[in-house]
Amino acid sequence: MALSKKGTRKMTVGQTDYRWVVSPAADGMIVATIQHAEGTGQLIRVYAKADVHDARLAGADGFLPTRERRAIKPSDVEAIITEAVAQGWEPEAKGAPLVFDWKGSTLVRRGR
């Protein structure tokens, strides 16, 4: 399954080109989907907690806690790609998507 070029960003890590996009996911999460730029290889999906204000969390004084929305930046994507390859991702190989969690600056593979 290939990522659509529309709405994706391009990045080069080493000498390999990739496409990536960040989308909202369920339960206060966001997901980065990354694939080799040719669109023929295995996808990786990386979930990260989105720090989003929630009116239900307002304190007794009525003010919301100050938190910034979590974003996955290009520097994060570069680190994710590098770590996923180190953990065995072969971007040009076909196969079912690999799924990871991005915790702080650590990539943790789901299902292990």
Image (cartoon, rainbow, N blue to C red):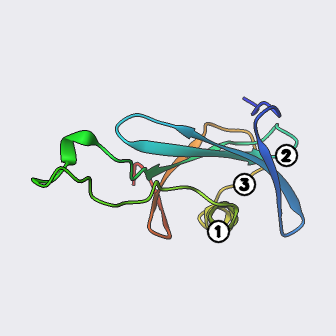
**Residue at screen point 19% across, 49% down:** 58
Relative image position of residue 84 (x, y in whole percent): 62, 61
Q: Label for residue 36?
A: none
Q: How many marks?
A: 3
Relative image position of residue 107 (x, y in whole percent): 50, 63
Q: Secondary structure at mark 3?
A: loop
In the rendered image, which residue does mark 1 sit on?
A: 79
Relative image position of residue 16 (x, y in whole percent): 86, 60
Mark 1 in CB contact with mark 3 (< 8 angstroms): no
Q: Please say whether residue 92 is visible from this viewpoint.
A: no
Vertical order, 60 against 12 (above or below): above
Q: CA distance from mark 1 to mark 3?
A: 15 Å
Q: Residue furthest left?
A: 60
Mark 3 or 2: the one toward you: 2
Q: Please say whether residue 112 is visible from this viewpoint.
A: yes
Q: CA distance from mark 3 to mark 2?
A: 13 Å
In the rendered image, which residue does mark 2 sit on?
A: 37
Q: Alpha-carbon neighbours of circle 3 within 10 Å: few (<14), some, or many (≥20)?
A: some
Mark 3 in CB contact with mark 2 (< 8 angstroms): no
Q: Amino acid at mark 2?
A: Ala
Relative image position of residue 18 (x, y in whole percent): 80, 51
**In the visual, does 28 lie left or right of 39?**
left
Q: Secondary structure at mark 1?
A: helix
